[in-house]
Amino acid sequence: MKLDLDRQEHGRSELAIEGDLELGLDDGRPGTAALAGRLMVDNVSGRILLNGELAASGAGVCGRCLKEFNVRWVVPVEVIVLLDEISEEGEGDSLVLHQRTGEVDLRGPLSESAVLAFPQAAVCTENCRGLCPQCGVDRNLEDCTCVADDTDPRWDGLP
């Protein structure tokens, strides 16, 4: 997951990305993710722009039923490598790297992009029914006999 600045052609090209990346997430979110896809590379006027979307996957825990499953999500990537170290240019939400020559290690920016794109509440399936909040039974596997009580006792004293 490197970009060789010394061999990068001027104009537009593609960069294949594939491999495992350490994310450092916890609490049911993937610590490691597999990334795959292609990024467009535009080498113009003192900067290199990398953008595109990568597919990511990793082991996570469902936010509803607490079962482990393989989470898949899309990672939008927008990275700018400035070849002029003096420039203070920034482009909004893009990650900006300053480097003139050599290889740029993209693991940091790709890891940050993958973490930011990870869904807030990953679920194993769209129709996951989750756990019963009263008895804890997995409602995907069996129905519980709990009576749904939608009243909140904190409101009982109000007229």
Image (cartoon, rainbow, N blue to C red):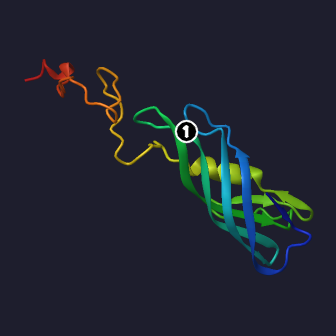
* Residue 143: x %, y % from top left: 25, 30
Residues packed near mark 1 inside 10 Å, few (<14), some (14 to 19) or many (20 plus): many
Q: Kindly identify which residue carries mark 1.
A: 60
Answer left or right for 56 relative to 139: right
Query: Viewed as shown, does residue 95 lie left or right of 132?
Result: right
Q: Is residue 30 above or below residue 7?
A: above
Query: At which x and y percent is residue 42?
Result: 74, 75
Q: Quadrant of residue 78?
A: bottom right
Q: How many marks?
A: 1
With respect to residue 7, does 143 lie above or below? above
Front in this rendered view, residue 146 or 73:
146
Residue extending furthest toward the bottom: 11
Relative depth, front residue between 14 and 153: 14
Residue 90 in view of the camera = no
Q: Quadrant of the C terminus?
A: top left
Left or right placement of residue 85 versus residue 117 in this view? right
Secondary structure state at the residue bearing disc 1 = strand
**Residue at the location (86% across, 62% down)?**
85
Q: Nearer the viewer, residue 118 or 17?
A: 17
* Residue 36 position within the rendered picture, expressed as x and y whole percent measured from the top left: 67, 59
Nearest the viewer among 155 and 55 is 55
Residue 132 position in % (x across, y down):
31, 27
Identify the amino acid type marked 1: Gly
- Quadrant location, the N terminus: bottom right
Give the residue displayed 66% in from the left and 67% down from the top.
Answer: 51
| Left/right of residue 31 with respect to residue 128 in the rendered view | right
Q: Would residue 130 be visible to someone looking at this image?
A: yes
In the rendered image, the residue lying farthest to the front is 141
Residue pictured at 45% horizontal, 43% vertical: 124
> Among all residues in the image, which is located at the extreme left?
159
